Image: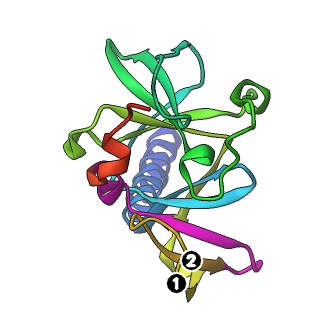
Amino acid sequence: MANRQSLKELQERLAQRLTAARTEAATASWLAVEAGGQAFLFPLVQAGEIFPCGGIRSVPYTKPWYLGVAALRGGLQGVVDLVTLMPGGSRDAVVTDRVTSESRLVSLHGALGVNAVLLIDRLLGLRQSSGFTAAGDPPPGSPAYVTRVLTDGEGRSWLEVDLQALAGDPEFLSIAA
């Protein structure tokens, strides 16, 4: 009898945890990342998979932010350096000097129709909109896909990047130098 009671309690605890996990996943709004010391928020519904950084093959005659291609899950993905892509990003920095064990490639969601991944310095986890307050418009000269600046409870500034707008940006789609 005691075993049945323990099994029943275990099942109830597991059911509660599963319900809580579904609720947490449903309320997460963004994938938080860092690149070049700047914090970015990608809408979770627009982000795809996260891959370890490696196996990038350079492509000649492309823009400085286009690092090349990587074979990921049996397909070729264009690799874009988020730091260099952003206005004011360092064009002189050698990417290989920045790549660490924490660096990742974040793919754009397949529904966006672009086979591309963004090189980021590190993942910062999932964030909910309730943890941020609007801090104003993007910095002057920001591209249209940088939608706004948010501030978290610790006072850190975050740039929200609309990956759908990025995928449709003519500059982003034109990689030739």
Name the foreground residue: 158 vs 2.
158
* Numbered mark located on residue 140 in the image: 2
User: What segment carries the magenta color?
Assistant: 152-167
Residue 76 seen by the camera: yes
* Numbered mark located on residue 95 in the image: none
- Residue holding disc 1: 137
How much space separates mark 1 and mark 2, taking CA atoms? 8 Å
Residue 132 locus on image (x, y percent):
58, 80
Residue 47 seen by the camera: no
Residue drawn at x 57%, y 68% is 159
Indicate left or right for 98 with 110 as reference: right
Residue drawn at x 20%, y 44% is 111
Answer few, some or many: residues within 10 Å of disc 2's Cα (few below 14, many 20 plus, some between 14 and 19).
Answer: few
The answer to whether residue 85 is above or below residue 115 is below
Name the foreground residue: 18 vs 111.
111
Q: Is 164 covered by the magenta stretch?
A: yes
Residue drawn at x 60%, y 24% is 53
Residue 40 locus on image (x, y percent):
58, 60
Name the foreground residue: 111 vs 16.
111
Residue 81 locus on image (x, y percent):
56, 38
Q: Nearer the viewer, mark 1 or mark 2?
A: 2
Residue drawn at x 46%, y 22% is 61
Residue 36 locus on image (x, y percent):
72, 49
* Element type at mark 1: loop
Query: Do the CB atoms of the residues marked 1 and 2 lie less than 8 Å apart?
Result: no
Q: Is 60 covered by the magenta stretch?
A: no
| Residue 169 in which image quadrant | bottom left
| Residue 25 in which image quadrant | bottom left
* Element type at mark 2: loop
Amino acid tagged 2:
Pro
